[in-house]
Image (spheres, rainbow, N blue to C red):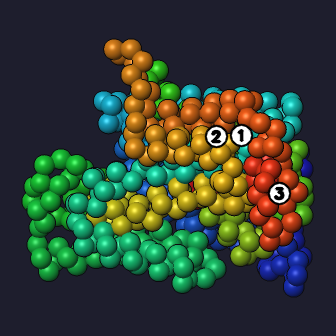
Amino acid sequence: MGLGVGWTLHGDGRTPAPGAVVRPEERLSWPRTAGLGAQHVVAMFGASFVAPVLMGLDPNLAIMMSGVATVIFLLATRGRVPSYLGCSLSFVGVAAAIRASGGDSAVVTGAVFVVGVALFLAGLAVQRFGARIIHAAMPPVVTGAVVMLIGFNLAPVTASTYWPQDQWTALLTMLFTGAAVVCLRGFWSRIAIFLGLLFGYGISWIFDLLFGMIHSTVGGEAAVDHWRLDLSAVAKADWIGLPSFHAPAFEWSAILIALPVVIALIAENAGHIKAVGEMTGDPLDDKLGTAIAADGAASMLSTAVGGPPNTTYSENIGVMAATRVYSTAAYWAAAGFALLFGLCPKFGAIVAAIPGGVLGGITVILYGMIGLLGAQIWITGRVDLRNPLNLVPAAAGIIIGIGGVKLQITDTFELGGIALGTIVVITGYHALRYLAPAHLKQEPLLDEGTSAYDDDSGDGSGDGSGDGQDKPR
């Protein structure tokens, strides 16, 4: 396929034959391919809208750069890995922590630019030495703990910033979104967050009509009278225009807060590559390093102009599973639509007008899901938390990350929260593993339904593969 842009027509170009799939190098007719591209854009809307808003960045630029990132990824993987790259929710806690310490948008994008560099270098290392270096440095007990503390570190943001703006809208939005995630099927379940946003907009508008202005905090500031849904900026926005660009700024304290997210992104990419490989029937282990490096390069480009970092989206992988269409042509179409949306300031103004109460209801579920996916990594990796070698570093790091524990190094430099928690998990695990007695370090053979601790000698870490490490944006 060369660069992965030469597709052959699948069958009659209309629908896959019974039991057949449209492979990455194939496509349906161009009108149907464009329709599938639009469907992929809708699937990533919810998270790609919410993430830049929560990070305080321009949603127009985020959508535009997601299209650019997807093109870079498809070219780098030569069309073998159908995936959409959208704004990563893993960085929301990082952005909140950086802003809480006085950083602005330039400092936020500078910190996550360095994460992109680290991710790019990690991808090159995986290309050179194989995936075993990831499994050795970050076994499931480590990766799961880091993903968990990143997600749960966000709890105070919801509790103190978004939920208090309109608690009843937040509650109703939470209930509706939760029901949509669980009860809807197929494509609709994949856009549950987007449907939750639409529901929240509607409830906020109705409450404004029925009850007038609300007296509450706005973004953690003092309580004032304000409309729940304020669309005044939408009317003023142009239909066509460039998003807001800015250069990154670099501060060591912010960079150290952001760097631990590299672990989550590597785990996420590994899970997505495995899932796509299983669906397409094309083992993609040889493309893992390339995919990670491409994700890092795309994130570097996005943050260099003021946008958020990107990652592969599980929402779009779900769309492929539902449609049985794995054509990369659909992702090129999706990237094109994203670029067009990014050139519409009015669209960005609508996104930026999401009421705080709506964000409160959605983030209660979203942040919790991110954290609990760390637990899913433990389950998949068969991590036995009764083994102190696993329990001690994970327990200490998670409490430090969630509680915002700080370690004052000098008068002007401190470690805390996500950064300190991650350091404790990684260094603690490997240091304790070096010092631990042999019976705690042995990896037992795990039979179905048998505890990893039945022989009183296992750490339950399985093969350390981290297979299935996957999470939503």
Callout 3: few (<14), some (14-19), or many (20+) C-alpha neighbours within 10 Å?
few
Classify 334 as above or below 432. below
Nearer to us: label 3 or label 1: 3
Q: Quadrant of residue 329?
A: bottom right
Measure the C-alpha gap from mark 3 to mark 1. Answer: 25 Å
Q: Which mark is residue 455?
A: 3
Left or right: 186, with 182 as reference point:
right
Q: Earlier in the sequence, mark 3 or mark 2?
A: 2
The C terminus, quarter of image: bottom right
Residue that badge 1 annotates? 138
Nearer to us: label 1 or label 2: 1
- Give amino acid for label 1: Met
Indicate the position of residue 133 as horizontal and vertical percent values. 81, 35
Measure the C-alpha gap from mark 3 to mark 2. Answer: 31 Å
Indicate the position of residue 320 as horizontal and vertical percent values. 72, 69
Q: Which mark is residue 229?
A: none
> Residue visible at 59% across and 43% down?
392
Classify 276 as above or below 254. below
Decide: marks 1, 2 in contact (CB < 8 A)? yes
- Give amino acid for label 2: Ile
Residue that badge 2 annotates? 263
Callout 1: few (<14), some (14-19), or many (20+) C-alpha neighbours within 10 Å?
many
Left or right: 77, with 263 as reference point:
right
Does the image show residue 275?
Answer: no
Q: Of 384 and 133, which appears nearest the observer?
A: 384
Indicate the position of residue 443 as horizontal and vertical percent values. 83, 48
- Give amino acid for label 3: Asp
> Residue visible at 39% across and 77% down?
175
Secondary structure found at label 2: helix
